[in-house]
Image (spheres, coloured by chain):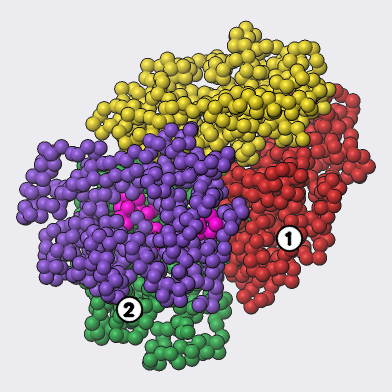
Chain colours: A green, B red, C yellow, D purple
Amino acid sequence: MPQKSYKIINDPVHGFIRISHPLVFSIIEHPYFQRLRRIKQLGLTEYVYPGALHTRFHHALGAYHLMGIALDTLRSKGIDISDEEALACQIAILLHDVGHGPFSHALEYTILEGVHHEQLSLLIMQKLNEQFNNALHLAIRIFCNEYERPFFHQLVSSQLDMDRLDYLQRDCYFTGVQEGTIGAARLLKMIDVVNDELVIEEKGIYSIENFLTARRVMYWQVYLHKTTIATEQMIVQIMRRAKELAQAGVSLPATPALSFFLLNRIRQNNFHESEETLKAFTSLDDYDIWAAIKQWTDHPDYVLSELSRRLLERRLFKVRLSPAPLPAAWIEERKQEILAKLPAAGYLPYFLIQGSTENTAYQTKGSSIQVLRKDGKLIDIAEASDLPNIKALKKMVKKYYVCWAKYN
Amino acid sequence: MPQKSYKIINDPVHGFIRISHPLVFSIIEHPYFQRLRRIKQLGLTEYVYPGALHTRFHHALGAYHLMGIALDTLRSKGIDISDEEALACQIAILLHDVGHGPFSHALEYTILEGVHHEQLSLLIMQKLNEQFNNALHLAIRIFCNEYERPFFHQLVSSQLDMDRLDYLQRDCYFTGVQEGTIGAARLLKMIDVVNDELVIEEKGIYSIENFLTARRVMYWQVYLHKTTIATEQMIVQIMRRAKELAQAGVSLPATPALSFFLLNRIRQNNFHESEETLKAFTSLDDYDIWAAIKQWTDHPDYVLSELSRRLLERRLFKVRLSPAPLPAAWIEERKQEILAKLPAAGYLPYFLIQGSTENTAYQTKGSSIQVLRKDGKLIDIAEASDLPNIKALKKMVKKYYVCWAKYN
Amino acid sequence: MPQKSYKIINDPVHGFIRISHPLVFSIIEHPYFQRLRRIKQLGLTEYVYPGALHTRFHHALGAYHLMGIALDTLRSKGIDISDEEALACQIAILLHDVGHGPFSHALEYTILEGVHHEQLSLLIMQKLNEQFNNALHLAIRIFCNEYERPFFHQLVSSQLDMDRLDYLQRDCYFTGVQEGTIGAARLLKMIDVVNDELVIEEKGIYSIENFLTARRVMYWQVYLHKTTIATEQMIVQIMRRAKELAQAGVSLPATPALSFFLLNRIRQNNFHESEETLKAFTSLDDYDIWAAIKQWTDHPDYVLSELSRRLLERRLFKVRLSPAPLPAAWIEERKQEILAKLPAAGYLPYFLIQGSTENTAYQTKGSSIQVLRKDGKLIDIAEASDLPNIKALKKMVKKYYVCWAKYN
Amino acid sequence: MPQKSYKIINDPVHGFIRISHPLVFSIIEHPYFQRLRRIKQLGLTEYVYPGALHTRFHHALGAYHLMGIALDTLRSKGIDISDEEALACQIAILLHDVGHGPFSHALEYTILEGVHHEQLSLLIMQKLNEQFNNALHLAIRIFCNEYERPFFHQLVSSQLDMDRLDYLQRDCYFTGVQEGTIGAARLLKMIDVVNDELVIEEKGIYSIENFLTARRVMYWQVYLHKTTIATEQMIVQIMRRAKELAQAGVSLPATPALSFFLLNRIRQNNFHESEETLKAFTSLDDYDIWAAIKQWTDHPDYVLSELSRRLLERRLFKVRLSPAPLPAAWIEERKQEILAKLPAAGYLPYFLIQGSTENTAYQTKGSSIQVLRKDGKLIDIAEASDLPNIKALKKMVKKYYVCWAKYN
């Protein structure tokens, strides 16, 4: 236990974040958590929004801070919450993303083989639980939605959780996209708990609507921005190629942590079978990836060096986005242009990628947002009579894209 | 003409507003425009949001400022705009609201008899045009949508005009309702002109969506806030009663300007028939109304003094809002409670008011927002394939209300 | 006591202000306090900064809010504060300015005859204490610095009180003068109490320095802005003339509350001798003043109507500010210019006014800011070794001015 | 030349940054400039302020943006500025910091041997000038203060340059230290040019004062924050040790770029003698440093691995700051504590470091801020009569520190 039992952390988004419990303080000081300082929240989005450099460390602290406010509000409305529950719930949100690796969404299927970050968050929480003498037991139950009072889990993970409330506001602040501004303070004043379920007061429905729309704006203007899609495809192809080369025995400069994931095909079970896997994973961060890409710019393999150089110097893939699949003839033209430049036809799949992406602004499946009407009844927000557009937000929007390397 | 030909005005919303043309400067210095300093933009909304004290003067300047940015953007995109057109368009927006009186929406049908503020804005612009040797001729044509290039009028008055862009941001700033934040700077970067019609670039559709949703939020949380409805009904009833008393020959303390409107029944034609009417109107502002209400708290007429005292001391009408008309039995109960306290049954209509209010977040009638697709085609934003909710916003939302005086 | 025992008030400056104690709620609902809604915090400053329309009502609530944060901080540092003390201290700050009249600084010596607003605040607190069954007893003792733990009074009134912390931030927000921004949240984290005296932690000295400099900037750019000086002199001369006329028996349109102060010469003792004086004073607000000035624009008295018209139409006095008294010859020239236009030479003193104004950014007399060094010693902040400029801020800066009416 | 000749870059600090000239666009796209994306503006400050992750890339663009505003202002005041001069001045500010390496201030004397970043900025500008057919000729003359109109250089580098104006505001935004807020927009409205020298209008002196104080606050709360000093000392000792080991032939994992600087002792002249040096330097960024430190945590050398691990896991040096040198006895105690834990006494200098740091908030030497009085005279701002504290800011403040490794 540290001597100094509390700490104040500066946050331009929320002001000051106060860490007052020694266990929370110790978790934050733990290398597993400090590692999040080296993982950017939005990966390569900085190539579109140069301010978007904030880390998962800062987001986790911000969500922790909002959880404190949410719990205070609920208590002030008469909801009985024990100190033990409050602490567990705050730890659960603090660690909800601790299993993220570098460029997480992009690399979940290249460096790893389909291991989801939630599973790794849970694994790391369990390791910490061992180290802290079972002190995270209740936090884990809440995280896994095994605790008998579901609103604690809903505060950690639902359509209206502290995760979303923090990241929308934070991503907005660092990108500068004002349209994503949400009134988190106002929303937090209007949450309540009925039958141990999280609900929102009726007067909060316009704030919710605004929150859902803001999220939608952020999806299309930031998270699924076409340049971000292109950039992520570049890093995916780089890592895919690096892994193929490594597995084929080609020598590649890389840090030990990265080498481990290039040489081995890591699935979920590997984490349980050997300590080494988790050790390597918790050593891996953005710096390993970038240091490797920088060195690979001189690698003899054409694909690896060409893509690495392009990414480093920000000569990005072109991208075309469309509500329908793109015309085959047009794609064929792009292919021919690239093939005319490539040293080998087999390289084409690294230089032209087709795919699709989709987003549903409001999901009712599993975790709808419940509104507490003044007459005491609960209704799904999509059923509120004067919000015709929430229903519309349930419709999934799908976009097709082609990314390709432009040669001059 | 003033000696000093330019001026910088501090604006917490937009930073600095620069007035560089001497004609604009002279219009701002004119008593007709200075009068707007004494008319609050949001009337009685300060009773719900105590910061909402900003004036129509400040809003007009802000809209003028945004118009300058909009015109610069269009010119930088190659739209040919002459200096004369630019000046006229800026004057048109500067004066678009100059015909507002105090508590305009509330008093349009009590102090005046159905005279709309647009008609008075036009009348005042015509008077100024006479005084400034016809220098406002083109501004008036633009204001009236008589100019051959419609986009100038659309910048002044349409679904995406500088009026809305300023007031949403300004009302948001002074009320503190963050959900209404719009990225005006971003929106203004994305306007363009096609065939002399104002359009928005395709990449701007999420900003438009956010703008429409923000507007909707402001409608229900600010402009049609139930306490504001109640408060406006109070001032309407006070003025209705005062006018009835005045017309019946009862003596009432009031400034000369207010007395004029209490003693006479002013319709649109009165403004054209006598100079006196416009003189009285341009002398009238919030101060006349409040000074009268303050004095009426001691008036022997029960209705007038009771309502004035309640408004002054912020003992407001209760209000109940509902998507359907309120139950007759419940209304009857309220009536009986009030009748038990009133000295005369005939006073009831001043103490219990029924009504309805409605809002459509996106109107296509007449002035839809046109999106310029990358293929050069124009489509109505409600037809954009991945914005299912704009269509939904076309649905009108109507609410019924009852306001009533609560007696203890 | 009201049914609903708490309330949330929107504040664009601090977010949400929560009123949780029924006594505080009742005080806010009292007409004495509601009256502050009709008194602008910065009087005529709106003529320079059009956004500066915020009221003493809003400021009092903001200071109350900061007091809550300050008390929470001190408690979290182990300072023993009873609930009774906390409530009293919050009421004291809520009511510290309740004795302000309209255009307070300007009219303290014209409408009133040298009655200070602190004395009236105390008087009104005593009246409220009677109405609320002695519940404000401790608040009054704290306000008067009669309570045995001086830090409570220091939180209400000292160089580092919640009054200054709120008004600097609020005036900044509404004027748009960014230089006045202070990190109130940070400052509040660093206050502490030693021997029942308010102190600041050593690491807070740069924040204090910034706070003092910000205050200085606000003095010269806002509070003592030369146009504000000119405008205040205009209202002083208008009221001086009106009072002279009234006392000489000339008929003047005015509300009853204003007439009372024009016809009578009210000193401190009048408030104690008759209930009528306080009743008139608590009926008086900005609306009475403006409604009168508007009517006086047509008054037969040249001085009264000329000055009223100039103020209303914003044709303001010119002003020249100087570190030394202005040259006699130059002043004489101005006088001659004015005399050439005036109908009577005796009117000159209303149209050319000489005076001086001064400001000391840091005062040690009586209430210096004490710094708590890490070694536990207390020192005056001006003695802190690495803040050479605080000492300099103790120097009083005096400026001489002449305001005069410009005739064309 | 790129096809698309302009670009808009999102900046949460200034809104939108517009790049309209193709040469500026090409410079920004150049790998020398893109490299600044990988160098944090504030180095290790993120360990104190987790949001302080902004890069030199973003700062350079921000300063470029402010330069555009400054030049527009000067032109609007009638200063004759040719398009060629304006472009050159904007390029000069864009590239003023292009010679910074990773953790620049810390590593100027370890990785390099006393090579200043200004010299490297100039060298890189000269290389770019060659590549762009001498198009940067005038920019270089302005940067070197060799152009005959000195105000252009003063806008790039002086007490009131666009560099400081951007970094203060930006550092403030990303750290969240509100006290550093400056009204850059207001300051920029008040600059002028007299005899080709940059001056500030008299009414701007309070803004200048605020700017100098804000800078001072940022120095002590951010740039010279004691934890930042400690952290920088750690990275200095790590690199010092790494270089010693490398020079002694010990094998060390490192990227080729970093290895180059560990194996060679690079002075200014090396850059001129071989292309390789500049190539290595422009390949080096934060990622090389962090990737190395991460790997060195497992190095057999005690000093290197111990310090690397401590830095990575944020177990930082303790630090004590004092206006006078710290007592010898106290330092001796610290040394004994450390020696008791160290495997070799010779390692002590890596684990306890003494030093001093100093700051002068306003420097008159060489580049004082000139105020243009209304009478047309120029005076040094420190001589302005009502700014006693500027003089005080000329006093240098020096602080002594000891940093040491704490063993449990």
Give the position of the N terminus of chain B as an image quadrant: top right
* Mark 1 nearby-residue class (10 Å; few <14, some 14–19, many ≥20): few
Q: Residue B338 in magenta?
A: no
Which residue is label 2 attached to?
A297
Whether residue A176 is visible to the viewer of this picture, yes or no, is no
Q: Which mark is residue D272?
A: none
Residue C95 position within the rendered picture, expressed as x and y whole percent measured from the top left: 53, 24
Residue B112 relative to residue A63: left or right: right
Q: How many marks?
A: 2
Tell me the kind of residue under disc 2.
Answer: Thr
Residue A181 relative to residue C262: left or right: left
Range shown magenta: D43-71
**Between residues B230 and B82, which one lies in front from this camera angle?**
B82
Name, please, the residue furthest toward the top: C273
**Between residues C326 and A310, which one lies in front from this camera angle?**
C326
Residue C6 position within the rendered picture, expressed as x and y whole percent measured from the top left: 52, 33
Q: Residue at x 41, y 52 (%)?
A: D171
Q: Secondary structure at mark 1?
A: helix
Q: Secondary structure at mark 2?
A: loop
Residue A236 relative to residue C21: left or right: left
Which residue is label 1 attached to?
B83
Q: Residue at x 43, y 90 (%)?
A: A341
**How far apart, in angstroms, are the residues tagged by discs 1 and 2?**
53 Å
Specify the principal SS of the magenta part: helix
Residue A51 position within the rendered picture, expressed as x and y whole percent measured from the top left: 44, 60
Q: Residue at x 11, y 67 (%)?
A: D248
Tell me the kind of residue under disc 1.
Answer: Asp
